[in-house]
Image (cartoon, coloured by chain):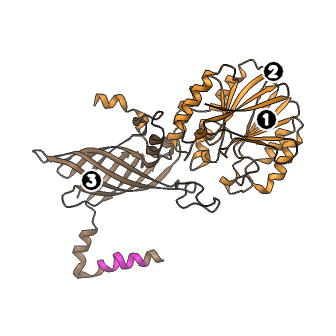
Chain colours: A orange, B brown
Amino acid sequence: MVTAGLFFSCKNIMFHPQEVRPNAKNLNAINLQKLQSLTPKTSFKFIMTGDTQEFYDELEDFVAHVNSLNDISFVLLNGDLVEFAWNNEYNWVADRLAKLKVPYITTIGNHDMLANGREMYKEMFGQENFVFNYGASRFICLNTNSRETAFDGTIPDMNWLTTQLKDTTPQNIFILSHVPPFSDDFNRSIEFDFRVLLRSNPHTRLSLHGHEHKYHLEQPYGDGLEYLVAGSGEQRNYALITVDGSEYKLEEKFY
Amino acid sequence: MRIRLLFYFLIAYPISLPAQKNRLVKALIPDHGTLQFAGGIGFLSGGIGYDSKTKRIQTDILYGYVPQKLGGVTIHSITGKFTWIAVSSKLKNNIRVDWLSTGLLINYVFGKQYFFLSPDKYPLKYYGLPTAAHVGIFAGGGLRYKRAGVYYELGTTDRDLASYVGNIKAIPFFDIVNIGVGAKYFF
């Protein structure tokens, strides 16, 4: 019994897999506070990956790899943190991400919204649509998983995005969302409005996405705005983005 | 309507036959009542079950409840459970020790946010598994004294097991184990 006591703890009391009992809360806010406390560099590097889902072995390797790099300002995890959105999964992911030495920010993916996932995401990470600044760069993070609410017009929140993109004071604007607008899982009836809206701000530099488990960079609309889809657990890859002034450089990296 | 007809022909009508009355009513009366804490099917679950003659095989139908205060969200679910008492011995003073029991359960959770069959909004095979159901397996043991019994179970679920198998390095086995304890009263 004593030995058993060493192995078992409250963690082993599961009322139901669909329960919402996060072992950490407000992680995006906590990490943003960490990020804001650092002195921003004019030339900086950040990492964007996503779709870590049920790849915990890979996630641990990713965290160790990022910790071995010393010139990364922050990490962006672009949705699908979990597979079924069970309480266990969210907690396992948060435990592993907690070991990152640099601040990390997450966005919500379609898998993260399953069952009680939205409730869990809200408690563990925070709002689905939010912005943050790093130096002269602004990151607009939003939910674009339209299919999860049956394309009812609520996702993405176009009014919110319109308001955010009115501000032209940041030198660079980066868009961060899980489902790219050219996906069948995006509300195709507003695809045109969406891409025109992104282009409406002259400082929008790049739109960053996940979901497709395939690294590719393209200009799908021929309007000068590049869309990058990158990173997934099973591919053990991520995008390394270097920003210098209003220029950016992209590299696909493996760990 | 269909359910009402089914109820009539399968239960109400046969019971009404006087010749068969006693035998049928007896067969319908459950063999035991169960109350369980945790185990992945509810904060508290209660229900009834039927046993084999020797009680080596026990089944349960349990309604499970998680209050929002404890589970973050309110959860109502139903569980079908099958337990096999693999190793058991009788001690003196009407005490029986179930050294090893093992079994399987299927849980269904009620709510609009879950699906059993893939909803129309998804293309075919978009998500592999239904969010409204899970399968659990467990092993444990117990004690019985006269008509009362207590038991414990160490269990896991289909999806937790898949996470473990797919991530041998990262997920310790004890992270996928959940504990359940319960009591039964044999009628």
Question: Rounded to the nearest whole Å, what is the CA distance between mark 3 and mark 1?
Answer: 58 Å
Left or right of B54: which side holds A233?
A: right
Write down the chain letter for disc 2: A
Q: Residue at x 30, y 80 (%)?
A: B16
Does the segment drawn in magenta span residue B10? yes
Residue to which mark 2 is pinned: A42
Q: Residues within 10 Å of mark 2 (few under 14, many from 20)?
A: some
Q: Is residue A104 above or below residue A226?
A: above
The three-letter code of the residue at mark 3 reads Trp
User: Do callouts 3 and 1 point to residues on the same chain?
Assistant: no
Q: Residue at x 20, y 52 (%)?
A: B147
Mark 3–mark 1 CB contact (< 8 Å): no
Give, as a single range, the part of the protein colored magenta: B5-14
Local SS, label 3: strand
Question: Rounded to the nearest whole Å, what is the CA distance between mark 2 and mark 1?
Answer: 15 Å
The three-letter code of the residue at mark 1 reads Phe
Residue to which mark 1 is pinned: A174
Left or right of A147: which side holds A197?
A: right
